[in-house]
Amino acid sequence: GFLFFPPEAPGNMGLWDQYLALKWLKENAAVFGGNADKLTIIGHSAGAASVGFQLLSPISQSLFDRAVLQSGAPNAPWASMPPEKAHEYAHSLIGLLKCRKGNHSAMMSCLQNKDVDVFLNFSSFFLPTFDGDFLPEDPKRLLEKGTIPAKPLLIGITREDGTVFIPRVLNDVDNDKNETWEQVISGIDIILRRHFEEDIIKDVALKYSEDKQGPNLNRQILAHFSRDHYFVCPLIEIAARMVATKGSVYVYSFNHQISTSIWKEWMGAAHGVEVPFLFGTLSSLPGLNQSDAEADRVLSQRVMHYWAQFARRIPPNSHLVKFNGCITMLLNKMSTISAPRHRKSCSFCHVSSATF
């Protein structure tokens, strides 16, 4: 869906597919008893980034009324790539599949005659790109220019969104012995794709080591930084830009941890943990600890209620709290929304924007 080899493969085909689906919904919602003027689109992780791309694209942003972005954003460092890199990856794929022959059409014909399964090994290399068409510019630049339309947004994270990346930067995530400061420096360097000087990396490491204590300090530091870098700061920027255009924004943090074989204990309220609560599919999770089944069920109902309330229009007495420059809602085991006790969790975004 994202091979960039124009003109035959212009890139962003996956986003165009989403656009066609949205266009179809807009044209046919009434047939199913829906209101074409009140369409809400929801995405998680890469899906949330896709929602953001639809929001930023002048081609599709008029097709829906509001959006939900869960642990993902179009301006996140993992969400897109420049066309030059996308084209470079396409040429690499052509070489690996031994299709480097003749003109563009001949190479595309060679790719089209390959078995579908061979492409699965390379699917993660290709991302949406700013092609000058669906995405006129880099999503970060589009946000800076204020091209985001004023729409209601519900956006958020899980408390330990960043733990999903830790196995990529720490060799032994379960062992707190022989921890060294060099491991933290190396981990942050990897997360930042080795784009910054060592002094900056050390400053970041020092910032994220504050208030950390107990075992597995390196894991704590890297998990916190990963969460902020990959999820929180991009989403907070989206929220701030939307507020500047007079759009309504609601920002949550899902803080409830569940015990299941999918997420290890140390991962906390990990990336994706809120999804089964939203869809009411907790019972399908393998190895789920049933001791908190009733509390989990009630929280699931609350999450579904809040999301539905957002989609239908926020009533005056809603528990949903508007964004005020920081995460304003915590979804926790008590099945309630509560406000954070302090604003310290916001400070990293200002530090990050100043540093990076």
Image: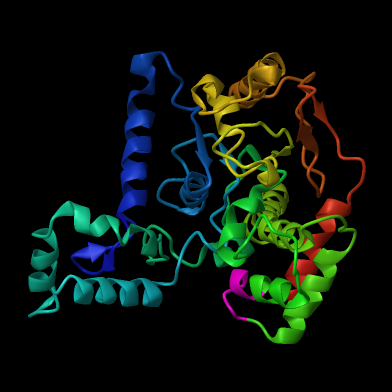
Q: Nearer the viewer, residue 134 or 211?
A: 211
Which of the 4 image quadrants contains residue 268?
top right
* Left or right: 100 in relation to 70: left
Residue at the (88%, 57%) spot, across then down: 213
Query: Which quadrant of the figure contains the C terminus?
Result: bottom right
Residue at the (44%, 38%) spot, across then down: 63
Can you say whether 233 is above or below 85 in the image? above
The magenta segment is: 189-195
* Left or right: 232 in relation to 278: right
In percent of width and height, residue 100 lies at 14, 78
Q: Is 302 a magenta residue?
A: no
Q: Is 194 a magenta residue?
A: yes
Residue at the (51%, 28%) spot, across then down: 286
Q: Nearer the viewer, residue 17 or 316?
A: 17
Q: Is residue 327 visible?
A: yes
In percent of width and height, residue 341 lies at 92, 40
* Residue with the most extreme front position: 177
Color scheme of the displayed model: rainbow
Q: Is residue 246 visible?
A: no
In percent of width and height, residue 351 lies at 80, 68
Can you say whether 133 is above or below 50 in the image? below
Q: How many marks?
A: 0
Which of the 4 image quadrants contains residue 276?
top right
Residue at the (60%, 66%) spot, across then down: 169
Q: Nearer the viewer, residue 13 or 60?
A: 13
Which of the 4 image quadrants contains residue 23?
top left
* Left or right: 206 in relation to 137: right
In percent of width and height, residue 176 lies at 74, 60
